[in-house]
Each structure stands twice: as C-alpha cells, then as structure tokens.
Image: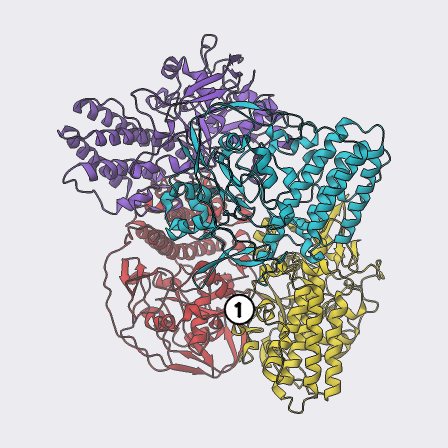
Chain colours: A purple, B red, C yellow, D cyan
Amino acid sequence: MTAAPHPAPAARNARYLQIRAASRALAAPLSAEDCAIQSMPDASPVKWHLAHTTWFFETFVLVPHAKGYRAFDPAYRALFNSYYVAVGERHPRPERGMLSRPALEDILRYREHVDEAMGALFDQKDFSPEAKNLVELGLQHEQQHQELILTDVKHLFSRNPLRPAYLRQWPLTTIQARKPRWIGSQGGVAEIGHAGEGFAFDNELPRHRVWLEPFEIASHPVTHGDFLAFIDDGGYRRPELWLSAGWDTAQKEGWQAPLYWTQRDGAWTCFTLHGEAPIDPNTPICHVSFYEAEAYARWAGARLPSEAEWELAAQSHREKCAHDGNFVESGALHPLALRESPPDGQLAQAFGDVWEWTRSDYAPYPGFKPASGAVGEYNGKFMSGQYVLRGGSCATPGAHIRHTYRNFFAPHARWQFSGLRLARDA
Amino acid sequence: MTAAPHPAPAARNARYLQIRAASRALAAPLSAEDCAIQSMPDASPVKWHLAHTTWFFETFVLVPHAKGYRAFDPAYRALFNSYYVAVGERHPRPERGMLSRPALEDILRYREHVDEAMGALFDQKDFSPEAKNLVELGLQHEQQHQELILTDVKHLFSRNPLRPAYLRQWPLTTIQARKPRWIGSQGGVAEIGHAGEGFAFDNELPRHRVWLEPFEIASHPVTHGDFLAFIDDGGYRRPELWLSAGWDTAQKEGWQAPLYWTQRDGAWTCFTLHGEAPIDPNTPICHVSFYEAEAYARWAGARLPSEAEWELAAQSHREKCAHDGNFVESGALHPLALRESPPDGQLAQAFGDVWEWTRSDYAPYPGFKPASGAVGEYNGKFMSGQYVLRGGSCATPGAHIRHTYRNFFAPHARWQFSGLRLARDA
Amino acid sequence: MTAAPHPAPAARNARYLQIRAASRALAAPLSAEDCAIQSMPDASPVKWHLAHTTWFFETFVLVPHAKGYRAFDPAYRALFNSYYVAVGERHPRPERGMLSRPALEDILRYREHVDEAMGALFDQKDFSPEAKNLVELGLQHEQQHQELILTDVKHLFSRNPLRPAYLRQWPLTTIQARKPRWIGSQGGVAEIGHAGEGFAFDNELPRHRVWLEPFEIASHPVTHGDFLAFIDDGGYRRPELWLSAGWDTAQKEGWQAPLYWTQRDGAWTCFTLHGEAPIDPNTPICHVSFYEAEAYARWAGARLPSEAEWELAAQSHREKCAHDGNFVESGALHPLALRESPPDGQLAQAFGDVWEWTRSDYAPYPGFKPASGAVGEYNGKFMSGQYVLRGGSCATPGAHIRHTYRNFFAPHARWQFSGLRLARDA
Amino acid sequence: MTAAPHPAPAARNARYLQIRAASRALAAPLSAEDCAIQSMPDASPVKWHLAHTTWFFETFVLVPHAKGYRAFDPAYRALFNSYYVAVGERHPRPERGMLSRPALEDILRYREHVDEAMGALFDQKDFSPEAKNLVELGLQHEQQHQELILTDVKHLFSRNPLRPAYLRQWPLTTIQARKPRWIGSQGGVAEIGHAGEGFAFDNELPRHRVWLEPFEIASHPVTHGDFLAFIDDGGYRRPELWLSAGWDTAQKEGWQAPLYWTQRDGAWTCFTLHGEAPIDPNTPICHVSFYEAEAYARWAGARLPSEAEWELAAQSHREKCAHDGNFVESGALHPLALRESPPDGQLAQAFGDVWEWTRSDYAPYPGFKPASGAVGEYNGKFMSGQYVLRGGSCATPGAHIRHTYRNFFAPHARWQFSGLRLARDA
C-alpha cells in the first residue's frame, strides 16, 4: 500500500472519528436484531462489521503500537478476525450469525474503547510512519465495510416476507435516460495503476505499461430499461448468449432476472433499501452477476471492457466525475438517472451508482508485491476466480474511490450494486 | 384429542394466563438478539416460538370463535404457521432465522393482544365445547414449545465461542447415584394408551390391548458415569455395537461423545444451560441420539424397552413419580441424581430429568383417528421415521406429562434432553 | 437362522448347482458392459452380484470348513465384501461400479472355482451341521441377489435413452382385474414368526404372540388402474394425503407418478424389463415407495396392514398361494392380472407379482437373537428406518418365499417391485 | 480457426485414417468393460470418446456435405453430442457412464461406417473448402480426445483397488535431472497468437501485441524431486503459501500431495499408466492443480509465467523443441527426465512431458471472433473460471501441438498431466 501524506494529530483524529462515525450512522436505523443475523455465508451481520473494523485497529495498530494498551476483551481476537491466518484462530465465516453475544451494545462500547485509545495514540510523539500507514489502511478498510453493511442488510431484508425498508424516501427523482454514445480510444502503450502520493491498496500497484488495441467504450452504463429488453428478448432462455459456466449457474439457480426482481401480474418490481419498488428503466442496472453482464454484452453486439480500457477512459476526467458521483453520501442508496450528460469524450456515471464489471480476472499486476506482515493477506491471496469491477456504487463512500481502484467478486455474485458499461473493438 | 373437564371462566383464564406467562418468563434472561437467531434448521428462534404459540390461539380459537376479532397483523398468518397446510401459506422452516422484523417487542405486544382477546372470549356465554378443547390444545402446545425454547437456546449458545450461560447457578447438588435393579414384569395382554377424562393428544388414543412377553426394566436411567464407561471401552469405535444407519451417521458426523461434550486435556466437560461444566457421573445421561442409546444398550448386554413396556412399568406409580420429577419448575435445567430411591418395583426418575428413548417407532395406535380440522395435522402426519421417547425431561413443564405421553424425534436427533433406561427379556 | 433338514450329498450338490446356475442364467442376456455399471449407490453391478454371492460361499463356508482350500484371488476378500465388518476391509458400496477389472469372465471363472470346491466339500464325510447351515444361508442369500440382479439392471436400462429391453416378449397376457373384497379377521392373540423345520432367516424368529384388533384386508392388491385414479384425483398434489416426510421427499424428488412412468402426449407408459410399455390397468401397481403406498391408502379411505395382519391373513392358504404365484420362474418379469380369483376368505396374489408394503417398521421380534459370527450382521443391524414388505414379487425365486418372510426397504425406495394391499379397522 | 493448406484427396484420406486409427489403437489394450465406465463427471468413458469424435465428423461434415449420407443410428445425434447446444438435445455429461448400450463393438462399427463415408467424400469433386476446414477441425478434435482417453482411463484405473496397468513397461529410463537456469527476456511490445497458414483454433487468434515487463523463465520444468522438497517443508500445511481459494480446496479435498500419490511406510509412490510406481525425482512433476503450482512457485520465491511470457520464450526454438518432445508417440505415457539439456537460452521440455500451468486466466484475445456455426461453441463459451496451460504432455499427439496452443482447465483440476515451470520478474 502506498502511504497518503500524513496530516497533523488533530486533523488525523478528526478524519478518523468522522469515518468511524459514518459506520455507526449506517447502523442507526437498525435494531439489535437486524444487526445480529447473517442471511447467507457471503454476507455478515452488521454487528460483525462494526466489531471487525474495530478489531482491525485494535490488532494492527493498538496492540503493536500503543504502549500499555489493554484489549477490550481477549476473546474478540479470534471472534472478529475475518481471514488473517497470521493473526491466529478465526471464528468460521458461516458462523458469524450465531453470535447473539456479545450484544450490539457491547460492540458499541468496544468501538468507544478503541476510539479513545486511538485518540490517545494520535497524540503520541512517537507515532511511527508505519503506524500511520496502518491507520490509513484501517480507515480505507472501514469504508469498504460501510458498503458491505448496506449490501448485507439489503440481502437480509429481502429474505423477510414483510419486505422492510432500511430507509423510506421513495420515489427517487426520475429523469429520462440519455442514449449512450461510443467514445473511441486509439490504444497503444498505456499506463495503469496507482501513481503519486495518495493512498492506494497494494493491488493497484505497481503502475505499469499495457498494450491496448483501439477500442470504443459507451458513454453511459447499461440501464434497467436496456436490461428489460434483454429479458423480453429471451435473454435468460438462450444459451448461445452465455458463457458455459454462466448458463450452468443460471439454470441451477433458476435465474430469470437480476437479483431482487419479482414479477407480479406481469410487471417487474425490485427490492430496494427503500422497500419494494417499481423498476425505473432510466437508472443503471444493478445486482447482475458477471455472467449476466457478459451475456447482456454479447446480446447487445458488444463486450465488457478490460479493466485497463476502463481505467484509460476514466483517467482524463477522473477528478470531476468522482465529485459528481451518486455515492452513499447522496442518501439515494440506489442508482439514479443522470441529470445532465458530460461533455463529449467523457464517461458519464463512471464513479458511483453501480460497480461496473470488467472482462478482467482479478490478477496481480506485473511486479506486484503484497504488503508485509499480516496485512499482506488483505488482497493478494484472493487473486483467483474473481473478476474486477470499477468505479464504486451508490453504497460506496465517495472519498474511498479512485480511477485505479480495483474491486473484485466471484462471477456469480449479485448482492453488490453491480452493473456494467459496454465496450467494443474499434 | 380427549377433552379435559372444563373449569369455570375465571379459573380458565387464570390457567391460561399462568401458562402463557411461563413462556414469557423463559425468555426473560434473553436479549432480543438471543431470541432472533436460528442455530440450525431443526431449531427455531425463541421469538418464533413466542409468536407461533400465540398464532395458534389466534388461528384456531379467536378467528373462528371470537366474534369481531381483529387480527393483530394479517401477515402473521403465514409468517408464524409452522406446518399446517390446511391453514395456507407457511414461511419456510429454515428461514425462521431471517426475521429480524417483527421485533421481539412487536411479538410481545402480539401476545398481549391475543391474551386480551382470549380473556374476553372466556367471559362469553356461548363459549363452545369445541373452542374449549382448542384452548386446552393450545395450552398443551404452548407447554411443548416452552421445552423447545430451552433446548433451542441451549443449542444456539453452544455454537458461540463465548459459551454464554442461560442461567448461572452451577454447581448443582451432587448426590451419589444408586445402582439400578431389574424390575420384572410377567407380560401377557396389557392395555396402553390414554383413558379417562383428562387431556391427551390424539396420538395417545385409543387405549388398546397389546401382548407383551415377560421382560425386565431397570429401576434407574443410565447415567453419565455409565456412558463414560461405554466411551472408554471404545463404544464410538466399534461398529459391531451399532445399527448400520447409526454407525453411518456417527462416522459422517464425527461423533465421539454425546452432543455438547468437549474433551480438554483428557477430561470431558459438557455445555449446559449454566455454561460449560464438568461431567457429573451420577446424573442421567442426556443429549444422546436413538442410535447412541441403542448402541449403549447392546454394549451393556441389554436393549431399549418398547413403549408399551415402559408405559406398563410406569403405570402403577404414575402419580407419585410425576410429582417428584425434576421438571422445568425445579430450575435445575439439567438432569440430577436422585436423593432417595423409590420402593422396590417402582421406576426411579421415570418422569422428568431426561426423555427416555424406546425401541418403538412412532406409529399410529390401532384405530387411531387424527383430530378433525387443521389440528389433525398436529401429530398423525409425522408418524414415520421417528422413535418414541417417554417421561419428560428437566426442560418439560411438570403438569404437561402423563405416563401415556408420546414424544418423538428422528433417530439422529440429540439436542433434546434425551437419555435412556435399559430393559431385557426375562 | 433355523436349519432346513439336511439332504444327502448328491441332492445337496444338485440343489446348490441349480440355484447357482439360476444366477448365471439371469446374466445370460447381458453383455459384459451391462454387467459392469452401477447406476446409483443403492444398486450394484450385475458382475458384483455374481461375485459377492460367490464370495459368501468362499468366505463363510470354504475358508473355515474346506481343508486346504486355496482362495481364487486374495484381493477378492475385501473387493466383494458387502458390509461384513467382522470379515475386515470392504470396498465402498458407491465404488462398486469402478471395477472394470476383474472382468466378467474372471468372475465366471471365480464362480466355477468355488462351485468345484463346494462340490468336493459336499462329498466330505465330516461336513458339519454348522457348515450345512451356512450353505443353506448362502443359497438363500444367492436367491435374494437374483432378485436384485433384475431390479438393478432394470434401473440401469431405465437411465439409457435407448430404453433397451432385458427380454422382449411384450405384450403379456391381459386379463380383466377382479374387484377386491374385504376379508375380515376377528383379531385377538395371534402367533407370527417362523415355526417348524424349514429354513428361515433370523429376523423371522422367534415365533411369538401379538394382539390384533379386529381388521379387514383386501382380497387383491391395488392395481395400476386404481393408482391412475389416485393420480387423476390430484394424489401427487395434495399434501393432506401424505405423511410429512413423504410429502417432503415427493417435492424434493419431483415425484408425479411411480418410478419408471413417463407421460407422452397425455398417456402414461412405464419402463419394464421388456422395454417401454403402456400401463396395463389390471395389473398390480409396482415401483411405489412406502410413502406413495401410504398416501394411496389414505386417499382410498383405508390403511396399510401391519405385518402381523398380513401374515395372519396369508397363513391359512400359504401353501397354495405360494405355488400359484407369479415369481421369476414365470418369465413374465412384471406383475400380471389374475386369471381366476381364489375362494372366499383367501388372499389373491399374496405371493409373487409385487412386494406389499406394510405399516410396520422393520424391528426385532421380541426375543430376537442375531445369528452368531459374522453372519450375525446379515439382518439385525439394518433394523431401523425401514419398513417391512411381504410376499415376494415377479422377480423373486418362488422357492425363496414364505408367509413369514420379512423383506425391508427404506420408505423412499422405489426400484424394487413394490406395491400394496389395503386394510382397514373392522 | 485458420485453415491448413489442403492436401490432395488420397493424402487427405491417408492422414484422416492415420489419426482415426491412432484413437482405435489407444483403446486396444482395454476391455469393453474398461471402455464403458465413467469414473467422475469430469471424465468420460473411452467408448464415449470413440463415439463422440465420430459423431463430430458425422454431424459437422457428413450430414451437411455428403449427399445421400445415411446416419448410422439417428439416436446417436443426441447421445454423443457433448455440448453443442445449436445441434439440439444432449445426453447429460454425468450420465455418459450409464450407456452399457450401444456396445463397444457397435461403436467400432459406427467408426467404420463414418470412415467409409468420409473416404467417399474425399473423392468427391466438389469437396468444398468449408468442408475441408471442418475435416481438419475434426482431426484436431480427435487428437484432443486421444489425450483424454489416456487421462480418463488412468483416473478409472486409479479408483480400482487392483491398481491395473494400462501398459506395463516400467521402469522407464532414469536420467539425472539438470539444474534449471534462468533465461532472461527484455520484454517490451511482443506479439503472440497464431500466424501463418497452418491450422490453429479460434482461441489462438488474432495474433496481437502485448506489453511485457522484463522477466526470467526457468530453463526446465519443476521436477518431482523439487516438489517433494515443498511437501517436506510443510507446503500442504502452510496457508500463507496458498491462494485463499486454493487453500480452501486443499482443505476440503484433504490434499496432502499431488493426485495419484500414496504414502506407504513413509515413502511416496504414484499411480501411473504402468501401475503403481516409485516417485522418480528427476522427472517433471505432474498431476498438480493450478493452486498447487501457484503455491509451489510462491514457496520457491518465484511465480508462474503469464501465457505471453511462455509463448515468447518458446517462440525462437519452437520447431526443434516440438520435434524432440516426449509426446504420446514415445510410448512412455509418463514424463521423463531429459537426456541432454538444450543450448543456452532455450527452454528444455517446453513441449511434451507435462502441460505447464500459466498465471493467465483463459480469456478471449483482443479481437477474438468465435468460428461461425455450431463449432463456434468449441472454445469461446468456456472462457471463464479456467487457467491456460501450454506445451502439451506425454499423452498429447506430437503433431497436435504448437507454441501458440492454449489448453485450459479449472484451477482445481488435477487429472491431466499438468505441471509447471517457474518465472520471475527481472
């Protein structure tokens, strides 16, 4: 991981507290019961997210760097370890939902205990650069779990016949979708990966050269309306449109539409964080797997972009886009249609709204080196069997995203806000 | 079901409220989180038990018999239906743990709503005998779920590495176990099944004749100490002691001891409702499956009794035994050793402490007729693939048990307080 | 097991060779490929049946009783052991279909090797009664596997889209079915179980008393035509007709008709050992599970008989019936309609045609003692989770059957020729 | 697919017959029983391979291009279709082992029938270029299945406790392994993919540019001896060496060594097509999954090469290497140690011996276009979830391999002759 420039103690603490408070705020509309349940092995209880992010600071920052730090509860070391083998024992992932104890209120006190100790640490003179980097990593890590709090609770609520809403402010503003244009690129030798001083994960490094053939990429992501046309054209019944593994998965799982869709009296609705809602055709499609995205692209006579193509296309206007995006801070918690399209040659909605599947498997960049120590398990060991997504979603904290940011999920995963943007050979 | 003699309105209401309050009291030491989680498909969340028993009165008593009754929430009709196909839709059993909503406090208000309506109904003049019988059935049903509240929360807590205690009052009094004697019976034509005016489930009827060969039955149940000798003698490693299906299950599940046992530094402990505890060799063994009970009996040169043998042996002193038993009201919530042995020819601990597996499959008695209406699904449809247990346990309400009472579980089930008593041919 | 009276050496050998030849004859229409494949874990390759029955004589008769006997191949000891733990290692049951080697011709030579050694043994002076009993057990065992050869190859062929016929002599004679009458019995104390000198398995012993309430039993088994009426009346779509475990199984497996039935253009056909054939409504129904039999009986306003009821009803005319039955020797290999009905008060088709499910779980008779030695694993260890069938089928050798004979299968099993006869309370 | 230059009719037929005969020869040591059994869903019976390759010519060449061609058996159209959805119905893959009929001899007659019709077609004047291309594709396809015949029968024999040998000519010559050297490459813009007139699959096209950072690649593949050191160093017990998905797979499957290895009295042996054999430390390692290859490389302080790196390194001496390789024609049917090492800068054993896992997921090359028609399903639809292997193995026909050839398997697959060669950043 590259280190961000380090702010002064007070600012450091303020930023720390702001990000920590954001996690707490996400849990505010939820009851202790909502926070305790695990709805599938891929998802975790909200309470676990609140504890695990705290465990990260305790384990990687406080225990090695804060003299005299007293662990809140020694049992938490194994209980809230996600997958860090080097740290020792781990409570098994599918068992996270068995933990009615510790109670949510115990976890909130755990958060306060750690936040206090972190405040004290920030004031220490000998706060080492290594510790600073681990704090930054912990904050980035916490932001990732903020997104998972929302996607996991959405999944839980979707399993409840009462169809509860996390937030109720529907209908969201409806805007007519713009027709996408093709934006061309000449290709050649390009550079991708993180550069400069800001924070980046180890998987965004090193910056390196790639060769790209000329290509075109769509100005806008695929919308719910586009995807309805795919369904209406028999998209889920035509094996020739699908990768073999995708077709097998779709048959086994009985997929007939994206996750959270229900057909009632011929009309499709979808479950949102605002409860059940009609499909808005103008908004970017979400909750599709890599397989569905790939099949859609074939049906549309196009393909998914590679992650290098996506990064190159987003690079020139990365600052502006990232500011305008529909991130978690907008409160929409659902992809939106765009009020105004960007100037020619720029991608609309590249950042926020929905993660965009690319055709690139999640693999190490040439020269990749995992971070040293236990945090080296953060990214590298997951580099097989997954595909890269880019750009962040309506559940991502805006400050968390970069144009070099690589998210990754298994090709069948659908519970994230995952959509797509088309590309084609020039 | 046979009808109990019907008490006057006030008494009726008092009895109703007393049993309903007992359920509520069992949940008192638990948090909303404890009550929301389902630890395995066989178990249900405590909240679900509290709701489903209430649903029973609402669906089978109030809706058909209380004029103008307004349902607390129409969605509950499907949500808290366990398996009554005739009532309509059912929320799937393994999904009961997905219901973070309705909240525990909603369920407690649901209980109050129904209890009020029931109180009003009791005062009605035209309270029909049919309604009275359904009320009694509902109360018996509620008592069954009281036991399940305890066994299900015990299972949940056992999955938590923190090993929480439901109640902490260990150590329980330790008493030296008595050596069991054999009690003989001449057999011949005997009668089993319910007779008389008191309540009984339809599966205890009709009273009928059976032929029994001469047999002997043990005065005391098998103890933890006895079972340790079986383990020490390689009981879990000797296929010749087991039924074939039992051995296959034991291998697949990796059984090396009863459920909830852990070996630490060579010594066995077990998880109880008081937390982790040492094994007390003097107390009746519990948390063994039919398969383990059957293998133990073969190892001991004996066999399990048939349910008819058990009932015949318990018949003569059924009143006395049932009074003395270690039921849920004792607060021990764990089997205990007996202070004094009963007179010669009487069974010790036949009632309470642990359910005793019999060698009888759960089948209809000759002439069995399921109750009419939806409550006919109560017992009859489960009459395959299960074995009968007798006598109640330390988690059963004492007033719920009769010597003709037939409990039943699958032969691999271990999470009930299930033990055994030996028998042999005379 | 009780011993049959022992014939003289020559007769003994003749009987031995006749039964052994019958197994060989069953394999005659099959290729080596047909004999090698295992179509499901419950079924075994024909080659395995031919080898295992031979292994039985080698292991239990020749090795302990024939001086100087040289094993055909020492590897066969584990390879063809079915489930005798006391004999040592066993090749896992689901792997029986991996054995392309030894070749079918090797197994046929193995049979000759063992048959020669057995012939020599029969001539020995000191041929002990114990050995004689084991020979008889081996022959009874071989007859059981003769039936399995047919049911297992039927299952294999049913999985082949070419729908090959084992034998082609369709159509079988069609005869109008007779309407069944109810045959009454007064019940009381009755005796069941084997008596006398002939051979019986240990599970038919000891003969013992039971009490029976008055009952009626149908003169004829349920026919294909009867069962079609059940299907047409929604039998497979009405959960109220089914045991809970039966309904769950039917849903999970997608049962809509008995095994081997296919609907083509609205008409049902079934796969037989003669290939695909139309349903003949006059013939006894077969290939139904216990669950389907039990649901049919409920739909018909009746119930399944207990095994004691069946045995009592069949007892008086057991000799005559057993002679007339449609057993494997008839060559029909399918249940047939009856040419003439028996006199009043006698069961038609009690023996042969189809095995008849009873309501009795497969349990030890009072006083049951398994045979001593490894053959004690023959029956006793399977006494849980199965139901008793009576009377033999069109695939059973006629000489193998007795009115006290207890067959047993899991309640979901359908690949045997299993049907039913109704009973009801008087 | 690019077309090979088309030879004259007689030569065409000779080449066709030679390749077809090679398949037949591979089945010669096998019995009909050996050819009928499917040992796991990934593998197919040899009989099926013999039929399916014939089906390919019948379906894609004879039916559309040979006037008046009469199908050998219309049922084979579905029976031996592997995965061509466009061709219609398919017999399910895991059911291939149910086909005791058609018999092996029927399939051999099917082969003759098709070969005759192909011979007649070759003589036709109007034999179109399209047909010629499909013939070539069919021959390449047949060569692929020749390799699978060997790997699938090896798997079948490994499941048989008798450990049969396909061929018995052990010991193979033992030669001392050479220590590998690192061969450097400067990287930069390189070209990979097929060029020129010879045949290539569509997945090798189009030839295109890639950017490579400087790298080094090992002169020799990793040997059995190297891999033993990894095992001895706890390689299978150290999660930090593994990808997360690899570690999970290894735990679930209980991997402790490559496939086919057995430890007896402390020494490792492996099952080969010559039967059980001691490990020869000098020969290239095989039967490792991508996960094991990747973990080994990390343990060795190196990494797997990308497929572009491999192709670039093999490019300069591709002709020579391919001639010298240990392919199926050598008859060794097992990887061998190299007699002499190649000149500096050249890869040893790049072709033949073992397929070499690369770090590249199997993805479409930029500009990839699947072949048109049903044969477009040949490659493209499998481009997810698999990794690329290069160079062919001791079971591959030598004439089948090119330096641009892309084989692909799932990361957990081990039943191919799959090994690895190390690479590292320069």
Give percent across and percent down for residue A411.
50, 34
Q: How many marks?
A: 1
Give percent across and percent down for residue D22.
71, 46
Q: Crowding at label 1, few (<14), some or many (≥20) Cα neighbours within 10 Å? A: some
In the image, farthest residue toward the bottom: C125
Q: Nearer the viewer, residue A65 or C156?
A: A65
A163 w.r.t. C263: above or below: above
Q: Nearer the viewer, residue C327 or A373?
A: A373
In the image, farthest residue toward the left: A125
Q: Nearer the viewer, residue C26 or B297?
A: C26
Q: Residue at x 72, y 66 (%)?
A: C105
C135 w.r.t. B252: above or below: below
Give percent across and percent down for residue C12.
72, 84
A3 w.r.t. B366: above or below: above
Give percent across and percent down for residue D4.
70, 29
The answer, for residue C254, to whether it is visible in the render is no
In this rendering, would A356 be left or right of B277? right
In this rendering, would A282 be left or right of D377? left
Q: Dividing the image into 4 quarters, which one contains the N terminus of chain D? A: top right
**Chain under label 1?**
C
Judged from the image, the secondary structure of the residue bearing numbered disc 1 is: loop
Q: Dividing the image into 4 quarters, which one contains the C terminus of chain D? A: top left
Pointer 1 residue: C89
In the image, farthest residue toward the top: A343
In this rendering, would D13 be left or right of D40? right
The answer, for residue A393, to whether it is visible in the render is yes
Q: Amino acid at mark 1?
A: Glu
